Structure formats: structure tokens, C-alpha cells
């Protein structure tokens, strides 16, 4: 066939462009590729030069390494119509996690829970630091909810303005995707939907944490005007002090300070009351005690400044003065140890910081005068403008340099938490930058506890490895290993390999695997990098069995199958991981395979899915944008108008083809980019695929492109609901209904109201709202969802006939997922066989749906249930119910060790609350109190409020405390 697309690709000179280090290496036109020439012999090849300099993607803290030139030996020859070549298996390299990765996740989580418990009970441990440790541990688990919860807990227990400001800024940084556009200024007063822990004023000015004082300072009524103190100290000539009421003592001037040619009138007793040094100067044995005129020309204060000192000494207020005068007061307070005056100036200047410009002009004053609150407020302004603020040389110099660290430290505004946040942001932006290196060096300087040292040293190793400074990387990784971070051995091995010592790298990883009682999947994956042939494949298979969530083994095997001219199997292999997680690099690889088979329709579908996840994604190693590739393929794929797209979307939605549906919506949006309804539908699909950030981005686009106010209110309501603001979301829905009755407004209101425990009457009111929704104009895709939700509510109310009717209507308009609800109705009516048959219909349509197989297992006999759950595990190994079911069956059969092994296999790659709780219960029943306590503690680290685990923990603790008979 004629390929104009491929001719165009030739014109882009992709071969030359792709010789630079990128995600995949390319073979040149007509070149053959395969594994090592000695693949049939020893698994250890001779050392060879490391690949060229690398590129990186710092997404979720992972490094992506490049690959060397492809091998030219072997049998596979790329097709002539692929001038850009094909991905080469031996050139792939997995990500190296730039975060803490303990060998024993469960033990680390349990130890973290004990530390938090001890700190809560009043031990010396800092609760804020304890939660920051949890934050670091949760990074390797990858659960955004846990990561944010740990960060919030750290913010709650931050004990000073500096750490409160840092952690509040971090929370806001993590939530930047949730902001309604236009986002408010970083230091603007809180709105009704601003999370309390992110309030900038509370961070700097609150004297207690929000766990004690829940009132946001931005929403408090203004304080009453400050009145002069009712009594002042009056000194007699001997220096003795006596109190006199304000009414009795008129304002008098008995002391003049001479500054240049001007005299500033003051009251001696008021000035003396500002500090002990001034009291001694004016009433002690100094000559000034007997003078009524004192020369202050050399004391660094102007006449205006001294008049402000006089005014403050009489009235106790600084809020009427401009910043330059308050700065003079601050310097005066520091020189003469006037603590109250310094605190007042510090507070007032800190309150004047309204943005980046204010902060840049005031930070030097705060640092020179060691003003804790002012520096904290300026620092907060810098942090809330990250990463933009790091582009200013003066700010970068302060935050990154050793001298800047010392200045911040003097003012009490340097900490591990600060550099943990800064380095986190810098690594996301550019792992190889000097800024990143300097921030990590500062982080290492503040590391005191073992986990802090492990993290800082390991991340420095990752950055140096990325920069191509392999000797320095090796040293940092060695230091991290010396601190107890075993995972850094993988970085050490990488550094050895990059320096040409492949055998040394193999020996190192081989010893890691051999020395570990229970090797982890990453150990085998790392060792596979230094093997060839069958041993490499065996290690990768072992890695997948131990941790099926790692993508590299699938990608390698897929590329290897393609090199063996088995493209169909290659696609099947990579599709396993695409079904497990929506990763852009895996979708790109599959699209590449489809192009090799000239299946352009499927290739375009994957490219459209990629662009939905990341609109800026560049194909072919950054040489071509996805939209450009789609345009080049126009002649190879069918062209649909909007009516065709709607029909296709309807069919794919009904077939539970989420990726296909996503691709169709993306194509429709390419024609109508301002269609807010399509953007909203896109967000629903992304949520179903567990792509939270991309879903929020689509929802914001929907809100911004809304042509009508009632539509905009609905989309704002969903943004608020997904951000945890249920009541505000309800208010938006009601406002929208007030403007115009619409399906989406009623649906939002019903959804928000139904998201809590309701009695029968309240539940039926939700049904009524959904009926109102269906009475409004909408398409059958949305109406089917409404009928499905109505059926679920009727089931909860034990109104099974009504539920069956709703599910039937939903199925008639091809809402396929209603099979699951109807099966539930049959089961509750004691028709288990019919329920199984109903779920079989869903399984036949959604052939690769792990949840469908899992749900069907509830209605089948034991053998059928086991078969369905095994299939569910193959399709999605991260679903925990199959492991728990199989373990429970084994326990019932008296096979205790097998039951523990079943759960342990899943816990090894996914420390899950339910898995840990069940394993703890098994250990407890077996009399192993120590293991039961460890698993309970790990589970409680994931959810400290889980009632069943708390009860089991108490029971196991009691058993452990009992004397052994």
C-alpha cells in the first residue's frame, strides 16, 4: 500500500533526530536487531561502553534512562515502510525510583506507626517529622490519597510559623490542579472553599495549630482598635518605678534625642520601659541618665524613625507607619533589645507581604534583623509561586546557596522540611539542573534522622546519574547504602555499568538477590539489566511474578517478541500493562507496534488516548507531536463527521471500551474544542480510568469553555465536589437549577446528596432528583447512568422490583454496566444462577474487565469463583479481593501457610489495608502475636481510624503482654 505518511516521516529525518538519547533506541533503515550475539552462552557479557547522555522525565519521582545504539546482529529486519525503525529490547532501561524504597515495606510502615504513636503520647519525637517520614514512605507506594493525608497531618502538627508556611505552601502546590481558573493570587485571603490548612495567614500568624483553633484568620472579624495600655511605668529620679494610671499622667516631654540638626522629643519613662538596656542607659549610672539631651546621630536612625520610636513608646502601635519607618524601628529594637517592639514590627512587616514583589523587597530586611515572622512570610510568598520563583536569580541564590542557607538558618527559617519541598519541586522540573543539585545538597546538610539521610543521599545519586557524573553518583549511592537504604544498591550498580563495569554491576545485584531472604521484584529486574539471553528473560519473569505492577518487564518482552517477528504477541504483552495502568510510554509503544502491523486505526486510537492524558506529548522521541502524527495518518484511517463520532462513542461506551471512548471524544474535541459537554464527558472517562489529574484538567477546560452560566455552575460544582467541598457543590447545583433546569444540574445535586448515609425517605428524594434529570434533554449515555444510579438506590432501600425496572431501562438504552446491578437484584431474590448468567453477559461484552470477573465470582460455585478470580488477577493484579478470597478458602481448608503466602505475595507489591488486616487476623489465630502486631501497625499507618484493625491490635497487644505459660 502507498504510505504518504511514511514518506512524510522520512522528510522529518527522524533517524538522525532519534540518535540522541530518548525513551527508545531506534534501528536504522534495513538494519537488523536482536539480543547479544552470545545469548546462547554465559549470561554475563563483556563490558561495553555505556550509552550516550540521557534524557529524563521526572514524573512521580521516576527517572527514565536512554539507550545506546541498537545492535546490528540478529535476524529481525524492520519493514521498509518504517523508516524510523523499531524499539530495540536491549536498549530499554527501567526507571530508577528517586524516593525511599524499603526492602520490607510492612516493617517500615509498622515502625512509622509506632513512632507517630510514641510522639502522640509525648515522647521526644517530633510529630511533624514523623508524618513527613510517612510522606516519604508513601511516595514509593504511589497512593496520592495517602501522600496528601501525611502532608496534611504534618501541617497540622507543625509547631512554628516556618514549618507551617512550608507545609501549607506544599499542600497548595499539590492541589494546584484543582484550582478554578483564574486561580487567586498566592497570598490572597482564603475563600469559602480554600482548605483551612492552606490559609497563608494562619500559617504565619496562628499561634496554635488548626487541630486546636479551627477558625481561619482570613474569616475572623477584624480586631478592635488597639488602645494604649492603662498603666505605664513612671520613674523617679532614683530610677525606682511606680505605676500611674493613664488618666493621671499627662503626656510630657522630658527627653530629647539629637539626630543631626534635629531634636526628637520623648518621654524618658516611656523610652526606658522599652527594654532593660534603655532603662539602664536612662536611669542607671551612665552620664545619659543626667542629661535631657542625648546625641543619637551615630545610632543609625533617622529623625522620622526616632519620632516613630517615641510614638510607639507612648501608644504601643506601629500599624500607622510605612514600611521604611517600621524597618528602622526593627533595627532600633534589635540594637537595644526591645523585644515587644521587635515583635510588633516583625508582625506588621510580615502582614505587609502581599506577593512576590513585596517579599523580594522585604526579605533582606528580615534576614539582616533576624525577623522570624517577616522571613517566614517572604519565604511563603516564594514557595507559593514555585516553580516560577526559582527563575529569579536573587531568590534562587537565597534558597540554593550555602550562604543563603546560613542566613535563613539565623532567622529560624531553614529546615529539612523546606529543602524537602524545594528539592521535590526542582526534581519535577529538571533533574539535571544545578538548582536541583544545590537544593539536594542543602537537604543533605539538614538530614539528621536515618530516613532523611537515606532520602537525600539517594536522590543526590539519582541526579548525578542523570547528569552523567557516574563517579559522583556511585559515591552518593554508596553513602545511602551505608545509611541503610538497600535500594540504593541498584543505583550503585547502574553507576558501575555506566562506567563500563558490567560484570561488577551483575555481581553486586546478584549478591543483593542472594543475601535477601525474600527478594523483591525490583531486585530481579535490576539484575536482568546485566544479563543476556534466557537468564535475562528468567529474571524478568521472576520480577513480574513478584511485582506485576512494574512496566519494564512487559515492555522488554514485547520488544523482544517484535524482534522475533511476532507482532501480535508483542501487542498482547504490552496490552497487559496498558490494561493495568494508563501509562503514556506504554500506549506509545503499543501504537508503534500497531504502525508496524499497518493497523493505523488502532495506532491513532492509542495516540489520541495519549494526547488526552498529556496534550503536550511528543511522539518518536520528541520529534513529532501526536496531533501531527494523526494528521499524517489521515489518508490511512476513516474520517468521521460529528454524527459518526456520536454513533461510534455510543457503541464503544456500550462495549465498555474506555480507551476507545476516550479516543473518540478526543477526536470530537479536535473538531469542537470549545464543547464543554464533551470536555465533561472526557473527565468522566478519565476518572473511570483512575487518571485523577487529567480528569481535573478536563473538568477545568469544561468550566472555562462553558457558554452559559448554568453550565459553568455545574462544572464548578463537580470541581468542588471532587475537591472535597460537598456543600459548596450542592449550592452550585441549586444555583444552576435556578437559572435553568438541566440533566447535569439535577444529576450533580442527586450525586452530592446521595454521597452519605441516607434513610429511605431521603434516598427516595434522590431518586426523584434523578427522575427530574431524565425529564431534561440529554443523550442516552447519560440517561443510562441515571437509571443505573436509581437502581442502586432502590436496592439499598430493598425495593427490588423497582430496581430491576430501572436496570432494565438502562440496559434497553445500552448502558451495559447495568448488568451488574441487575445481577445483584437476582441474587437478593435468591436466584443465584440467574445472577451468574446476568454477569456472564457483562463478561462477554467487557472481555478484559477484571471487575466484571471479580463480581461474577460472587454468584458462582467455588471452582467457578476461583477461576473467575484467577482471571481477574491476571487482568489486574492490583485488585485485592481475589487474594483475600483465595486466602480465606485456604484457611478454611486448614492450609495456614499457603493462606499466609497468598496474602504475602500481594502485600509484597501492594501494602493494602484489607490485605494487612486479614493477614494479621490469620497470624493472630495461629498464635503469632508478634507478626499480628506488625501487620496491624502497618495497616494502621495506612488508616489510623480503621475500627476492625484497632480492635484486633488491642486484642493482639493483650495477648503479647500475657506471660508465657
Image (cartoon, rainbow, N blue to C red):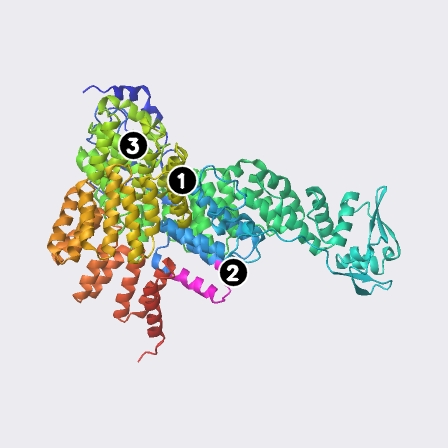
The x and y percentages for residue 60 are 38, 44
Where disc 2 sits, the SS reads loop
In-image side of 742 versus 434 (left or right): left
Between the residue at mark 1 and the residue at mark 3, the CA separation in whole angstroms equals 29 Å
Q: Residue 608 carries which label?
A: 3
User: In terms of sequence position, does the residue under pointer 1 or pointer 2 come before the other?
Assistant: 2
**Picture quarter with the C terminus:** bottom left
Q: Which of 453 and 511 is in front in this view?
A: 453
Residue at 49% across, 51% down: 196
Q: Nearer the viewer, residue 833 or 511?
A: 833
The magenta region covers 110-127
Q: Residues within 10 Å of mark 2 (few under 14, many from 20)?
A: few
Q: In the rendered image, is residue 724 in sight?
A: no
For residue 530: magenta?
no
The x and y percentages for residue 938 are 35, 61
Mark 1, residue position: 713
In-image side of 5 versus 713 (left or right): left
Q: Is the magenta stretch mostly helix, strand or loop?
A: helix
**Picture quarter with the N terminus:** top left
Q: Is residue 116 above or below residue 3?
A: below
In-image side of 224 versus 643 (left or right): right
Amino acid at each position: 500500500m502507498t504510505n504518504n505518511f511514511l514518506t512524510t516521516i522520512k522528510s522529518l529525518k527522524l533517524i538522525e533526530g532519534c540518535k540522541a538519547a530518548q525513551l527508545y533506541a531506534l534501528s536504522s533503515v534495513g538494519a537488523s536487531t536482536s539480543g547479544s550475539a552470545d545469548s546462547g552462552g554465559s549470561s554475563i557479557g563483556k563490558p561495553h561502553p555505556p550509552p550516550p547522555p540521557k534524557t529524563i522525565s521526572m514524573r512521580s519521582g521516576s527517572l527514565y534512562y536512554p539507550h545506546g545504539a541498537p545492535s546490528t546482529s540478529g535476524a529481525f529486519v524492520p519493514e521498509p515502510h518504517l523508516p524510523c525503525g523499531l524499539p530495540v529490547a536491549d536498549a530499554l532501561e527501567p526507571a530508577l525510583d528517586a524516593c525511599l524504597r524499603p526492602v520490607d515495606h510492612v516493617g517500615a510502615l509498622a515502625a512509622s506507626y509506632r513512632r507517630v504513636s510514641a510522639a502522640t503520647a509525648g515522647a521526644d519525637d517530633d510529630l511533624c517529622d514523623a508524618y513527613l517520614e510517612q510522606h516519604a514512605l508513601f511516595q514509593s507506594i504511589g497512593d496520592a490519597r495517602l501522600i496528601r493525608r501525611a502532608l496534611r497531618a504534618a501541617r497540622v502538627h507543625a509547631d512554628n510559623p516556618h514549618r507551617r508556611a512550608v507545609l501549607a505552601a506544599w499542600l497548595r502546590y499539590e492541589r494546584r490542579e484543582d484550582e478554578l481558573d483564574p486561580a487567586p493570587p498566592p497570598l490572597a485571603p482564603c475563600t469559602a472553599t480554600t482548605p483551612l490548612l492552606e490559609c497563608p495567614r494562619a500559617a504565619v500568624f496562628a499561634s496554635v495549630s488548626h487541630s486546636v483553633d479551627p477558625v481561619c484568620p482570613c474569616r475572623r472579624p477584624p480586631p478592635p482598635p488597639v488602645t494604649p495600655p492603662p498603666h505605664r511605668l513612671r520613674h523617679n529620679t532614683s530610677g525606682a518605678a511606680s505605676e500611674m494610671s493613664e488618666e493621671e499622667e499627662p503626656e510630657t516631654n522630658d527627653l530629647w534625642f539629637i539626630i543631626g540638626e534635629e531634636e526628637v522629643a520623648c518621654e524618658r519613662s516611656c523610652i526606658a520601659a522599652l527594654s532593660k538596656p534603655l532603662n539602664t542607659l536612662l536611669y542607671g549610672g551612665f552620664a545619659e541618665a543626667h542629661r535631657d539631651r542625648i546625641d543619637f546621630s551615630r545610632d543609625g536612625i533617622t529623625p522620622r524613625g526616632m519620632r516613630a520610636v517615641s510614638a510607639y513608646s507612648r501608644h504601643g502601635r506601629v500599624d500607622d507607619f510605612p514600611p521604611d519607618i517600621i524597618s528602622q524601628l526593627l533595627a532600633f529594637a534589635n540594637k537595644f533589645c526591645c523585644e515587644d517592639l521587635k515583635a510588633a514590627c516583625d508582625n506588621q512587616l510580615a502582614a505587609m507581604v502581599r506577593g512576590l514583589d513585596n517579599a523580594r523587597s522585604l526579605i533582606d530586611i528580615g534576614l539582616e534583623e533576624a525577623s522570624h515572622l517577616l522571613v517566614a512570610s517572604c519565604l511563603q510568598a516564594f514557595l507559593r509561586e514555585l516553580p516560577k520563583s526559582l527563575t529569579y536569580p536573587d531568590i534562587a541564590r537565597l534558597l540554593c546557596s550555602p550562604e543563603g542557607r546560613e542566613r535563613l538558618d539565623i532567622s529560624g527559617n531553614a529546615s529539612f522540611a523546606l529543602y524537602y519541598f524545594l528539592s521535590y519541586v526542582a526534581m519535577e522540573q529538571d533533574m539535571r539542573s544545578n538548582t536541583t543539585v544545590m537544593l539536594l545538597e542543602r537537604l543533605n546538610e539538614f538530614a539528621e534522622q536515618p530516613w532523611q539521610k537515606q532520602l537525600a543521599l539517594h536522590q543526590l545519586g539519582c541526579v548525578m546519574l542523570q547528569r552523567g557524573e557516574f563517579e559522583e553518583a556511585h559515591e552518593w549511592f554508596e553513602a545511602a547504602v551505608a545509611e541503610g537504604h538497600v535500594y540504593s544498591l541498584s543505583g550503585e550498580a547502574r553507576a558501575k555499568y555506566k562506567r563500563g563495569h558490567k560484570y561488577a554491576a551483575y555481581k553486586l545485584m546478584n549478591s543483593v538477590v542472594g543475601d535477601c531472604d525474600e527478594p523483591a521484584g525490583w531486585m530481579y529486574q535490576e539484575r536482568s539489566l546485566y544479563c543476556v539471553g534466557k537468564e535475562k528473560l528468567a529474571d524478568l519473569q521472576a520480577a513480574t511474578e513478584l511485582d506485576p505492577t512494574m512496566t519494564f518487564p512487559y515492555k522488554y518482552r514485547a520488544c523482544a517478541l517484535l524482534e522475533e517477528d511476532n507482532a501480535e504477541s508483542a501487542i498482547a504483552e504490552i496490552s497487559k500493562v496498558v490494561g493495568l495502568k494508563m501509562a503514556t510510554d506504554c500506549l506509545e509503544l503499543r501504537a508503534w507496534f500497531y504502525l508496524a502491523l499497518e493497523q493505523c486505526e488502532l495506532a491513532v486510537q492509542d495516540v489520541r488516548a495519549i494526547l488526552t492524558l498529556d496534550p503536550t506529548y511528543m511522539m518518536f522521541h520528541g520529534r513529532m507531536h501526536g496531533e501531527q502524527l494523526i494528521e499524517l495518518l489521515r489518508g490511512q484511517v476513516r474520517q468521521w463527521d460529528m454524527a459518526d463520532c456520536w454513533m461510534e462513542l455510543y457503541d464503544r461506551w456500550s462495549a465498555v471500551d474506555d480507551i476507545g471512548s476516550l479516543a473518540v471524544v478526543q477526536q470530537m474535541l479536535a473538531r469542537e474544542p470549545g464543547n464543554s459537554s464533551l470536555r465533561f464527558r472526557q473527565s468522566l472517562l478519565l476518572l473511570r480510568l483512575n487518571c485523577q489529574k487529567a480528569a481535573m484538567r478536563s473538568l477545568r477546560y469544561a468550566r472555562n469553555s462553558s457558554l452559559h452560566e448554568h453550565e459553568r455552575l455545574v462544572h464548578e460544582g463537580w470541581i468542588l465536589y471532587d475537591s472535597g467541598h460537598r456543600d459548596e457543590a450542592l449550592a452550585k447545583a441549586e444555583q444552576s437549577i435556578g437559572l435553568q433546569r438541566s440533566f447535569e444540574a439535577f444529576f450533580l445535586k442527586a450525586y452530592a446528596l446521595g454521597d452519605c448515609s441516607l434513610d429511605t425517605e431521603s434516598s427516595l428524594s434522590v431518586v426523584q432528583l434523578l427522575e427530574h434529570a431524565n425529564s431534561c434533554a440529554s443523550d442516552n449515555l447519560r440517561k443510562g447512568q441515571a437509571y443505573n444510579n436509581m437502581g442502586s438506590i432502590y436496592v439499598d432501600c430493598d425495593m427490588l422490583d423497582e430496581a430491576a425496572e430501572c436496570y432494565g431501562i438502562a440496559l434497553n438504552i445500552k448502558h451495559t454496566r447495568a448488568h451488574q446491578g441487575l445481577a445483584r437484584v437476582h441474587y437478593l431474590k435468591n436466584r443465584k444462577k440467574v445472577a451468574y448468567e446476568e454477569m456472564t453477559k457483562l463478561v462477554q461484552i467487557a472481555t478484559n474487565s477484571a471487575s466484571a470477573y471479580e463480581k461474577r465470582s460472587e454468584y458462582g460455585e467455588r471452582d467457578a469463583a476461583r477461576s473467575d478470580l484467577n482471571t481477574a488477577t491476571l487482568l489486574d493484579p492490583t485488585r485485592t479481593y481475589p487474594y483475600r478470597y483465595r486466602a480465606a478458602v485456604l484457611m478454611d481448608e486448614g492450609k495456614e501457610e499457603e493462606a499466609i503466602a497468598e496474602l504475602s505475595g500481594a502485600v509484597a507489591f501492594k501494602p493494602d489495608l484489607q490485605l494487612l488486616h486479614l493477614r494479621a487476623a490469620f497470624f493472630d489465630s495461629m498464635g503469632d502475636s508478634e507478626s499480628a502486631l506488625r501487620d496491624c501497625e502497618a495497616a494502621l499507618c495506612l488508616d489510623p481510624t480503621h475500627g476492625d484493625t484497632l480492635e484486633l491490635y488491642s486484642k493482639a497487644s493483650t495477648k503479647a503482654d500475657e506471660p508465657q505459660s
